[in-house]
Amino acid sequence: KSEKLYCVGCGALLQSKDQGASGYVPAAALKKRDTNKELYCRRCFRLRHYNEVSDVELTDDDFLRVLSQIGETDALVVNVVDVFDFNGSIIPGLQRFVGNNPILMVGNKEDLLPKSLKRSKLRDWLRQEANKMGLRPVAVSLVSAKKSYALDDLMQTIEKYRHGRDVYVVGVTNVGKSTLINQIIKQQLGVSELITTSRFPGTTLDKIEIPLDDDRFMIDTPGIIHSQQMAHYLSAEDLAIVSPQKEVKPRVYQLDAGQTIFLGALARFDYLAGKKTGIVVYADNNLMLHRTKTENAEAFYDRHAGELLQPPSGEKAAELPSLERFEFKASQKSDLVFAGLGWITVPAEVAVAGWAPKGVGLSIRRTMI
Ligand code: GDP
């Protein structure tokens, strides 16, 4: 019978199965363990040894507890979103939970969007889409955590809106929250000062508090899982293939009605009705796109998924939930969004269908670019 072990840092039950969940410790480290030594989970270990923050995923219960605790304090809430996966970044009910606390929306990964897209226009777009989702941010900032772009501006904006209060940083997993926090620590605040403090009451989760100038703190909260993200259906390898690393180059197709485009084996787009028209695909530059006739598309997919059509490759294609179809017709130029994968811009008044693995978000929105 295996004994239960707990992290001496955060108190989480230690486990070696899920790297993203709390209490993760590599199996080898557990095995090697000197019985007299206290064990840290990987997150606390990294924090202690490298002053480096990494994200853990949060269960729904813990998530609600953390959010309602933020609602009870007087603070500025910084909500980090991924501009390339805006729909997949939204935390349902955030505005309600944070109560009267102002929200600053930070659009991260701006480096992925075409340079030709005016940043003021992008900020307006983010604000309007946020409003549609029930969020009323007091301001919208655009940054690239990875490229260290506009971090000084962000810190100034935070100062402008926090009015001497604490700052809570929230975000779903994969938006780049840890990268952003680590950059802020490195550039603005000095690594030596990073501290872990008490847990959020009722959870096993530590708060990571970064001191600000006035005895206040910037508090990093654990990443929240967004169930509709493509990330949950892909292996780490395939996820790396579909997550863009560089500025995404739009790919334009002239389509006739009755033509289909496959995005690897992960998604499919059908042009159903209308005259010959241009559509634009925004996805990782290396994601393979394949055009075929709609009438043959289903048979084509069955024959080629995992080989000619990938990712996912080989056997993993068979494990992917089957593609579900949704039809759209918009009165204005719109983006058909495959959560986490990208989007296809279609002109007004054409009938199209999108297909995505069952459970992956598929939606239509006012065009971003
Ligand atoms: P977290 O789960 O929100 O903490 O996200 P991470 O910080 O672990 O980042 C998730 C992924 O997004 C990683 O592959 C990062 O390299 C990538 N990433 C983070 N920030 C940026 C950015 O500003 N631009 C780009 N292109 N990628 C980023």
Image (spheres, helix red, strand yellow):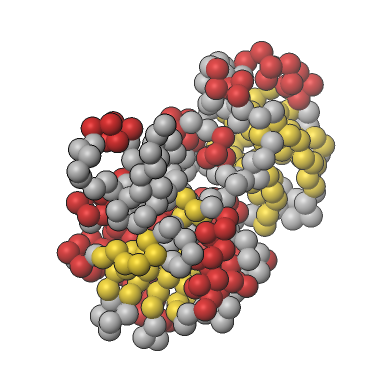
How far across and how far down the image is residue 126, in percent?
56, 64
How far across and how far down the image is residue 283, in percent?
53, 39
Q: Name, please, the residue furthest toward the left.
A: 192
User: Looking at the image, is 38 positioned above or below residue 69?
Assistant: above
Specify whether residue 30 is in view. Answer: yes
Q: What residue is rendered at 80% in x and 35% in y?
A: 272
Residue sitting nearer the eye, 191 or 9:
9
Q: What residue is rendered at 55% in x and 17% in y?
A: 315
State the image quarter where residue 3 is shown: top left
Instruction: Name the quadrant of the N terminus.
Output: top left
How far across and how far down the image is residue 95, in percent?
60, 71
Residue sitting nearer the eye, 260 or 275:
260
Q: Is residue 208 left or right of residue 252?
A: left
Residue sitting nearer the eye, 60 or 263:
60
Q: Name, please, the residue furthest toward the front.
A: 1
Specify whether residue 125 is in view. Answer: no
Q: Name, please, the residue furthest toward the bottom.
A: 163
Q: What residue is rendered at 39% in x and 34% in y?
A: 2
Q: Name, please, the residue furthest toward the right.
A: 273
State the image quarter where residue 200 is shown: bottom left
Task: Tell how many labels.
Answer: 0
User: Looking at the image, is 317 positioned above or below residue 156?
Assistant: above
Q: Is residue 252 left or right of residue 246?
A: right
User: Looking at the image, is 259 positioned above or below residue 170?
Assistant: above
Instruction: Name the quadrant of the C terminus.
Output: bottom right
How far across and how far down the image is residue 114, in percent?
47, 50
Q: What residue is rendered at 45% in x and 68% in y?
A: 201
